[in-house]
Image (cartoon, rainbow, N blue to C red):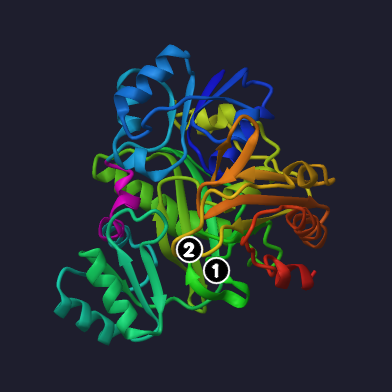
Amino acid sequence: MKALVLGGGGREHALVRALSLDPGVTGIHSAPGNPGISELAENHVINVTDGLAVTELAARIRAELVVIGPEAPLVAGVADALRDRGIPVFGPDRAAAKLEGSKAFAKEVMEAAGVPTAKARVCRSAGQVSDALDEFGAPYVVKDDGLAAGKGVVVTDDRALAERHARECGRVVIEEFLDGPEVSLFVLSDGVHALPLLPAQDFKRAYDGDRGPNTGGMGAYAPLPWAPQGLVDEVMESVVRPTLAEMNRRGTRYQGLLYVGLALTSGGPRVVEFNARFGDPETQVVLDRLATPIGAVLQATDTAGLGGIGSLQWKPGAAVTVVVAAENYPGDPVKGDLIGGLDAANALEGAYVLHAGTAWEGTDGVKASGGRVLNVVGTGADLRQARERAYEAASRIELRGSFHRTDIAERAAAEL
């Protein structure tokens, strides 16, 4: 098949890489892509939230699968436009993507489905915000109700900061804080059948020791040797299947990827959030471990074919990804600096670099164009070897003012 991947970040580079390793995929296109993706796919410059532009491109290149990476095209209804044209697409329709597009809607669905999650209040005024913060106490969890490009959630002990974030967002969801380690579980769905992927863990805080502001993610690893036995089966039974059934009851078939963000509390797994697409940077490690060719699996979510796939196969060993971020990320990251050392990092055995926020500089130079600039992936027989390779490769990257966390997967590797 020919595949078109929408998006231009590290998640999309990981998807393109996985598709390039699938012998059943004969051609890959990307829009808009990035310099790293261009080594594996033909890039096209279009507005990826414009359903007409996307369908016209997909028809012109005769795409047999369109993979929607970011959330914005999903919420804009790009999947609807593609399905209306009979073009297979990986990603939920606009109505289903509301599970990510509105935190309040997601809470409503979870409550109706009996899904275990944090207590929450939807607030529209300063008075409601104040009452909810009083009710739940610190740490305060304040979530923008709509899409916020990974910057809509504040978790803080600072009451003033929590109130300021609420004012800036407008309508917000304020929740009780869920203590315990967080786990990301990706689940493929065709609306009837659901197929889980390998659980992963990411690191949201900017600095070592889980300090600093929340980010879109500073690194991730998989598998999770410490995860409770039967965790995936429990989440499928208590969270995923009830959620899909509730969406069907509402007349909204969920096709694509359901991201389940979990907190493993003393009372069992609780849902922190739903997303309607692959998470970043967990995708980078999960897809690295996937042995099953990905193209037909993604296409099956659109053709009600997941039931015939059975289970997915996984490579032995582990993967760790380390995010190289631009100076001053996540505030106002510095852009435009040239990046060196890419070839040296890619030359290291068991490691490679995925582009997350890069752009061309001249004919052959690459510069930083976003906050999270690169994902450096290390693989190995276990987490120790994988993280050693990831950090060795990251040390070869040259980008003025850049930084990365040094403790990604450190605790899990030490406990092996």
Q: Is residue 96 magenta?
A: yes
**Sequence-earlier tag: 2 or 1:** 1
Residue assigned mark 1: 206
- Overall secondary structure of the magenta section: helix
Q: Is residue 290 visible?
A: yes
Image location (x, y in percent) of residue 121: 24, 72
Residue at 57% across / 18% down in the picture? 1
At label 2, the amino acid type is Pro
- Contact check, label 2 and label 1, Cβ < 8 Å: yes
**Label 1 crowding class (10 Å Cα cut-off): few <14, some 14-19, many 20+?**
many
Q: Nearer the viewer, residue 289 or 20?
A: 20
Asked if 259 appears above or below 80 in the picture, the reply is below
Asked if 395 appears above or below 268 in the picture, the reply is above
Q: Is residue 172 magenta?
A: no
Magenta segment, which residues? 95-106
Asked if 178 appears above or below 246 in the picture, the reply is below
Residue at 31% across / 42% down in the picture? 75
Image location (x, y in percent) of residue 266: 52, 79
Residue assigned mark 2: 330
Q: Nearer the viewer, residue 339 or 233?
A: 339
Image location (x, y in percent) of residue 246: 30, 50
At label 1, the amino acid type is Ala
Residue 112 shown left or right of residue 194 in the figure: left
